[in-house]
Image (cartoon, grey):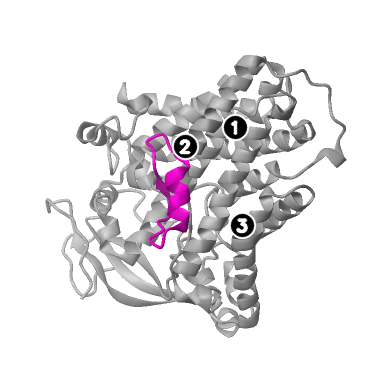
Amino acid sequence: MEWFTADGYWLSRLIFQRTLACIYLVGFLAAALQFRALIGERGMLPVPEFLRRTDWRLAPGLFRLHYSDRFFAAVAWTGCALAVALIVGVDSYVPLWAAMLLWLLPWALYLSIVQVGQLWYAFGWESLLLETGFLAVFLGNADTAPPVLVLWLLRWVLFRVEFGAGLIKIRGDECWRKLTCLYFHHETQPMPGPLSWFFHRLPRPVHRVEVAANHVTQLLVPVLLFTPQPVASAAAGLMIVTQLWLVLSGNFAWLNWVTIALALSAVDWSLFAPQPAQSAPPLWYEVVVIAVTALVVALSYRPARNLISRRQVMNRSFDPLHLVNTYGAFGSISRVRLEIAVEGTDETVLHPDTVWQEYGFRGKPGDPRRLPRQFAPYHLRLDWLMWFAALSPAYAHPWFGPFLERLLENDRDTLRLLHHNPFPGTPPTHIRARVYRYRYTTWRELRATGNWWHRTYVREFIRPVSLAPARISPTMPP
């Protein structure tokens, strides 16, 4: 079938695959380094307990067969090794069926991790990586030209990512319609980056232009992905530029980078490299690709209906394998930044003059003098949920209490998630959590104090506790 392959897209496939393999590496590395404290056997949300209380049909995966921390570590590090093999192009030197297996294995391993990740993995970019990684299995390798059907499916994913995000904004917070959301966003986003302070200080007319340009890129440009070249390439190029702008302005794990990878697959790179000799695809491969395409089209009904629904939801999976999902981000924007500061003391008896020392987190704001760091595409899962917990105590259930208990024990794996432990020798006797309001300093304040943030106390989040109480729960705001 001559229509089956897109000969000019071999370089598009190559660039897409290597980029996706890099993202896989980051995802597996984050899992390997963070899982023990988060979901390990002694973690805040242990996997064994989760498996006991949930039905395997809702979250099938490898860990339904067996779980131990050692086994999870083996899965995560095996995923890292597979990702490295794909980065260096091992899939180009093996038969087509073996290359597909090389891409199927990291997808299956990462799916198994997400299925038991619970709140720590409840982010849209997890589903986006899985959906994109599933389609990558069927893109083939150097033995044959990429199948046009899979290339179109990748554009369908990119369309839903961008168009879904655009619609949720227009339907959501009125500041998107008034072009004023960026007056607040760079200051209140989950995890600011080193340039976020400077983005926030751009003139307000520039912020309005940014929002307007974002609406164009997310609501109009995605339609052009389905037009002939070079228009489709130009549309993908605009999306790449927009995503790189977002990369510079904050930390959003690998959301931006998977989107960039999808856009790279839509660019026609044939002008930059000659077409290599490739054989015709085998019949079995054509049958598999057509069957997968039919499956994805069938599963796309509910996500597509969600797009046009007035009750559109963000970041929802409609099947247990995360094959076709719905996406969206920042349907509403916070006007005020609240942060939870966790503090401990080594004093046995508490009194009004008790000295409290604050724990430092790697990514989320803490010390007002500390400039936020760049971590994306690496995902700091604890820091992200700390941002959600500051929005409402409901987001702190059920992990925040176990988190504080592990700090009271100086748990090694938990402390590895932090930037600074004020009690390196012996654990604190008491822990408390307080809510502060953070805002960026002005240019004048920055020059005078050296502080990037100004913070003011708001309320208690958790009153001082020790290991004696049986339960640690957030203090509800008045």
- The amino acid beneath tag 2 is Ala
> Does residue 173 show up magenta in the picture?
no
Q: Which residue is mark 3?
A: 247
3D distance between C-alphas at marks 2 and 3:
33 Å
Mark 2 or 3, nearer chain start: 3
For residue 298, the mark is 2
Count of picture labels = 3
User: In the picture shown, does residue 343 fall above or below 413?
Assistant: below
- The amino acid beneath tag 3 is Val
Residue 478, quarter of picture = bottom left
Circle 2: is it few (<14), some (14-19), or many (20+) Cα within 10 Å?
few
Q: Please say whether residue 375 is visible from this viewpoint.
A: no
Which segment did they paint magenta? Answer: 298-322
Q: Secondary structure at mark 1?
A: helix
Circle 1: is it few (<14), some (14-19), or many (20+) Cα within 10 Å?
many
- Residue 264, percent across and down? 70, 44
Mark 1 or 3, nearer chain start: 1
Residue drawn at x 74%, y 26% as measured from the top left: 145
> Does residue 306 show up magenta in the picture?
yes
Q: Work out whether residue 238 or residue 185 is closer to the camera in this orientation and state it.
A: 238
- Residue 158, percent across and down? 59, 48
CB-based contact (under 8 Å), mark 1 and mark 2: no
Q: Work out whether residue 360 or residue 289 is closer to the camera in this orientation and state it.
A: 289
Q: Work out whether residue 101 or residue 427 is closer to the camera in this orientation and state it.
A: 101
Q: Is residue 307 left or right of residue 67?
A: right
Q: Secondary structure at mark 3?
A: helix
- Residue 317, percent across and down? 40, 44
